Structures are given as structure tokens and as C-alpha cells.
Image: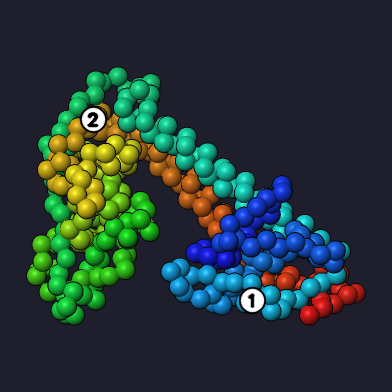
Amino acid sequence: MSIAANIGNVAIADFDAACPDSVVGFQAKKECDTAWLYQKLITLKNKFETLATQNAQKNINLQKIKPVKVLVPPIHEQQKIAEILKTWDKAIQLTEQLIGKKQQYKRALMQRLLTGKLRFLRFKDKWQIVRLGNIADMKSGGTPLTTINSYYDGNIPWVSIADMTKCGKWIESTKRNLSEQGLKNCSASLYPENTVLYAMYASIGECSIAKKKVSSSQAILGIKPRAQLNYKYLYFYLSSLRDKTKLQGQQGTQSNLNAGMVKNFKINLPALKEQQKIVETLDSFDHEMTLLDKQLVFLKQGKKALMQKLFTCAVKINDKESCDG
């Protein structure tokens, strides 16, 4: 178990191992099942974090770990609890693996669809290569003075890069809002619905779509496609370029882009109907990913709730025997 930085992370070593001083090893005695102990330590993560001290980094020592008391059921019940929780762990692992495979497949499919290497049979028209600035209008955001309270806490969502990384594809609400006064007293604009938001600093190349009217910080460029460009096609196209755009960023204290650089991006542009077909295909993958993400959350929450009951004797595997302190 880690006892520094990420305190309480646990794993079982299935081989003889040495470890650094940031890790402590637990060896189960004969009345304690190793797999049960592993699961029990997971439930104690928050407790160990509260007992930790802060020096150069947060840490906890054995003097604080050893006195912690736990409820210990008989060995056969420990083994049954460990077996049940292992089943949940397997389901979580398989779901995570499936999500990873789906993500890899989607990236590969995006690369082929958005470059015209893979096309749907009924589409034969030649694609154009166009400058993004010729088919979309762009404007960056701004930040009102944070020392003037009346500029904030209004009803205008104000998108930061943190909001984009948290929300993903669609943004409807934000951590901070601007007031009408705040919007008027900075360079921020009110972007219309379906504007593609593009991060130029920090998480360079991060993309989201505004689900309603929003404003943004100056780190974000609002891109409104013109008639010949589908906004979702633009979202997927810019997302597919993320690794490449990181390399194109200007190097200062951190890599960044500017509006002029984004306007000069070259876009592979099919006709609108083909753009729409590509969007429908990639949207279906996103829908599958959303369902899998929800399934993963359900499994993790379900396991956590079950652990709480099993490790406090709220649910007993065998009611003939009770937990010992």
C-alpha cells in the first residue's frame, strides 16, 4: 500500500518483491485472508488520508496505521466476501477494457473517415482541402476583473478549459457564470448554440460544443461554422488533430495556439450530406461510449455500496457467526 502522495492505493504482489519507503507491505496471518485484506484496505483509504501528515508531500507512517481497528469476520466468511468482490472487480476490469478498445477503434475510424480513406458507397464527389478561416468565423474569449464581484455570478455560462476537460463533448453549465455587466466589461463574447469551443492554451486542442449560449475565457476560441461546414464534423475533425496541434503550438512558458494559426488549419471537406453521414457514424460510437461509461460508474458505485455493507456486518454471509472487533 502506498503511504506517500497517493496514500492508500493497494495491490497484491503475486511474486516476491521489494519496495521503496513510499510503500508498505502487509502480510496476512493465518486467521486473515490476503484477498479479503486487500479489499478491506481499499475501504480504509479515506481514513488513512485523514491520518496523514503534510511535509514535502502528504504521508502516513506505520505508527498511525497499526492502531487502526477493523471488524474481522471468521476466515471462511472473509474468503466468501473476497470471492464476491472479486466478481465485481472482474466486471469493472472487463468494462474498462471494452471502453479502451472502443476508444482505440473510434480513433482509427475517425482517422479514416475524416481523411476520405474510408467512404460510404453512395458518395463519389471529390473532397476539397480548404482553409478553416474561409469556412468558419472565430473569436476568442476574455476574463473580467476578478476583483469586481458584480461581474460574476450572473446567468451567462463562462467556459474555462477546466470546464471543457470535465464536460467533454457538450457544455451546458460551467463552474462560474458572468453577469451582463461582466460580459460588457471584458473581451468575452456570447457564442451561439452549437459553437465549437477550442482550447488554445494548457490542454491545447481540447474541443467541446456549446449546447446553449455561452462565453469563455481568452484561452478558448469560439468557432462558428458557415453554411458549408457541419459543426459536429468540425468538432470531430479538430478532435482528430489534437496530437498534431500540440506539436504546432508556440513554445513559451507553455505550448499554445492563436486564432491566426487555427484559421490556417487545412480541412478535408466533403459535401454536407457526406459530412452528416460521417457525423452520424461517429455519434453512434459516442453514444455507445456514454452507455459504457454509465455502466462503469454503476459497477463502481455498486461495489462501493456492497463493500460498505459487507465490511460493517450490515449484510452477513453467514448469520450463525458474528464479526469480531
Q: Can you see residue 95?
A: yes
Q: Amino acid at mark 1?
A: Gln
Left or right placement of residue 297 versus residue 204 in this view: right
- Find residue 269 and name its label: 2
Residue 145, position as x, y percentages in the image: 14, 72
- Find residue 63 and name its label: 1
Q: Quadrant of residue 133?
A: top left
Residue 260, position as x, y percentages in the image: 12, 43
Write the residue at 49% across / 64% down.
5
Q: Can you see residue 9?
A: no
Q: Nearer the viewer, residue 215 or 126?
A: 215
Q: CA distance from mark 2 to mark 1?
A: 65 Å
Residue 93, position as x, y percentages in the image: 62, 49
Residue 25, position as x, y percentages in the image: 67, 61
Pick whichever of labels 2 and 1 is earlier in the sequence: 1
The local secondary structure at tag 1 comes to helix
Left or right placement of residue 149 versus residue 16 in this view: left
Left or right placement of residue 297 versus residue 13 in this view: left
Q: Amino acid at mark 2?
A: Leu
Q: Nearer the viewer, residue 303 or 20?
A: 20
